[in-house]
Amino acid sequence: MKLLKKSIITVALLFAVFAFFSATVPAVATYAAGETTEAEETEEDAGSSTGAKAVAAAISIGVAAGLGTIGMGLCVGKSAEGIARQPEAEGKIRTSMILGIVFIETAVLYALVVSILIIFVL
């Protein structure tokens, strides 16, 4: 159980770091590009900002989904080992496993929301 808790915490922290950087990098680039005068702004500048947003969104959801998959795999594997060792504790182990998977999946869905916000809002 300790490994499971550490894995969930690690995945959550990594997700938070990647979501933060994925959200801030395009915003900083857009702010820096906004300091130029309107006469200097071309369609090429707008295209590069859109490309940066797409890359940031792809990285954030890709990393979150990948790490979430790894976390879920570890969770299910350890739960299966625990049930094999103590079949009488199957109900408690299954409940803990499902709760952990729900938290991991929630983090991945938050990454999806952040990615959508990066694309459409920033």
Image (tube, rainbow, N blue to C red):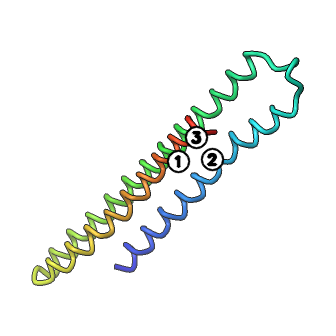
Q: Which residue is mark 1?
A: 114
Residue at 75% across / 22% down in the picture?
45
* Identity, as a three-letter code, of the amino acid under mark 1: Val
Quadrant (top left, top right, bottom left, bottom right) of the N terminus: bottom left
Q: Pointer 1 and pointer 3: residues touching (CB < 8 Å)? A: yes
Q: Is residue 79 above or below residue 104?
A: below
Gap between marks 2 and 1, in whole Å? Answer: 7 Å
In the picture, measured across the screen, residue 9 lies left or right of residue 119, that is left
* Identity, as a three-letter code, of the amino acid under mark 3: Ile
Could you say which disc has been placed on residue 98 in the image? none
Q: Secondary structure at mark 1?
A: helix
Badge 2 crowding class, 10 Å Cα cut-off, few under 14, some 14 to 19, many 20 or more, is many
Q: 22 or 31: nearer the eye?
A: 31
Q: Is residue 67 above or below residue 62?
A: below
Q: Pointer 2 and pointer 1: residues touching (CB < 8 Å)? A: yes
- Residue 82 position in % (x across, y down): 22, 76
Gap between marks 1 and 3, in whole Å? Answer: 6 Å
* Identity, as a three-letter code, of the amino acid under mark 2: Ala
Residue at 54% across / 41% down in the picture?
59
Locate residue 5: give its quadrant.
Answer: bottom left
- Residue 9 position in % (x across, y down): 47, 70
Q: Pointer 2 and pointer 3: residues touching (CB < 8 Å)? A: yes
Instruction: Tell me which numbered mark, 2 or 1, is placed earlier along the sequence.
Output: 2
Residue at 56% across / 35% down in the picture?
120
Q: Secondary structure at mark 3?
A: helix
Q: 64 or 75: nearer the eye?
A: 64
Instruction: Tell me which numbered mark, 2 or 3, is placed earlier along the sequence.
Output: 2
Q: Which residue is mark 3?
A: 118
Q: Secondary structure at mark 2?
A: helix
Q: 6 or 112: nearer the eye?
A: 112
Could you say which disc has been placed on residue 23 in the image? 2
Quadrant (top left, top right, bottom left, bottom right) of the C terminus: top right
